[in-house]
Image (tube, rainbow, N blue to C red):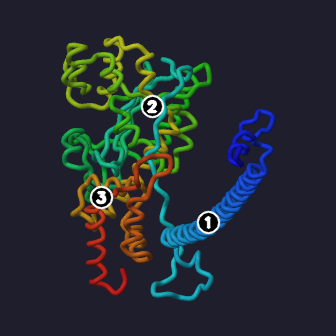
Amino acid sequence: MTLTEVSQVKLSDNDLSRESSPTHVYRSRISSNSKSLQEKDTKTALDRINKSISRSTTRIKKDTGKLRRKQLQQSLLRTTSTLQVKDGVSSYKKDFGYDLYTIDTEEIPAPMRQPEMQAMAADEVSDDCVVLFDLETTCTGSHAEITQIAAMKGDQRFNKYVLPTGNISTVAADKTGLSVQTTVQGSQILVHNGRRVAAGSIHSVLSEFISWLRSIQGTNITNGSKVILCGHNVRVFGMHAIISEAERCHLTQDLQAVVGGFMDTLPSLRQFLPGRDSYSQANLYKDIVNEECEGHSLVEDVSALAELVTVSGIPLEVLAQHTVMFHTAVERVCYLNEKNTRLKTLKGHLSTLPSATLNKIACSGLQYSHLKLVFRRGGEAALKHLLSEPISGTRTVRVSKVKQVHNQIIGHFREVLTQSSEV
């Protein structure tokens, strides 16, 4: 038997396994060592990757931190710039030395919104509280002066004329028959349909009206509630006129002490009698009461309204839905009066802008001098920022984001700037 055959016999022998072969053991050791080396290399590679990731993460954090700090610095600069533009340069300067412009501290008002009027509570509305009233005025605008007050509660009546400080418009004179004339002695008198009538100042007449309402409250209202002044279309006109006059006479608190709110029969009858072509008091009276209003007398108008409410059968529950609490009415009227004052300043300089845009600027609390001041402090960018300033709690902006609006206003101040050394 050859050596090869012996070797083959040994290798095939079941009593001698391959694992006992030195060659196989050597190879197994090599395989094991190789495996350990591979695991070690893999671990080293993973450690390197982890360290690389850690360094990258640290670098990203540092870069993010730097970016965030830069953003905060920029935000702070913008905020400071905005505050400087709004509140005055001197308030935010370390050095109070004079700059290119004269130092000022006038503040730009925050965005304003029209106050909401709230209805009176149901337990505050009763027939005993309702007093019907009406007014005559010098005109229909926001600067209208009262020329007559008439009111009634059952058999109790109030009717007084007021001598206005200004003129009565032609339209108002034709409608009311009232006019102001000058005597030979140079004094002014109030005339109604060619006949002189006794007329007092608005302060004295309004004080008398408040006293009359207080007597109504004392004799007709037993639960301690306040009077409700009821009129036709009172939310649009009568309420504004009497509150404006009370504000000018410093009698608002006295009026509020006795009046709890206002009630409007126009929207009430529109709700109760839908589908009509006209809801004017004259047409409603003609159709429902089947009579024509005789001429034009304020006292007759108040009496006609009382009859209209009675004959129409409108329930108190419907009328109560169209009431306005007094203090919310005051807030609305004061806001509108201030808005109209601001609007007047804008129309005097920016008449080329659409009326709706001018009205929105005024409603936001801005007048012409504010726009002028912002342009002077911060230029075009500041003015654009002011006009497009977001209103907190809403998705709207103060005035407009429209470039055309911005450019029109900026163009105006550019022109003013070229005509003057200082805007």
Which residue is identified by label 1? 56
Label 1, secondary structure: give it: helix
Report whether residue 248 is seen.
no
Task: Tell me: 71 left or right of 244.
Answer: right
Residue under the image location 24 percent in, 61 percent down: 353
Residue type pointed to by label 2: Phe
Q: Position of residue 332 (x, y in %)?
A: 45, 44
Amino acid tagged 1: Ser
Q: Amino acid at mark 3?
A: Val
Q: Which numbered mark, 1 or 3, is in the foreground of this view?
A: 1
| Foreground pick, 362 / 209 | 362
| Mark 3 Cα-neighbour bin, 10 Å: few <14, some 14–19, many ≥20 | few
Q: Is residue 265 above or below residue 259?
A: above
Does dot 2 land on a helix, a strand or a loop? strand
Question: What residue does disc 3 label?
Answer: 402
N-terminal of the pair, mark 1 or mark 3, is 1
* Residue at image point 67% right, 63% down: 54
* Residue at disc 3, secondary structure: loop
Quadrant location of residue 134? top left
Give the numbered dot on residue 315: none
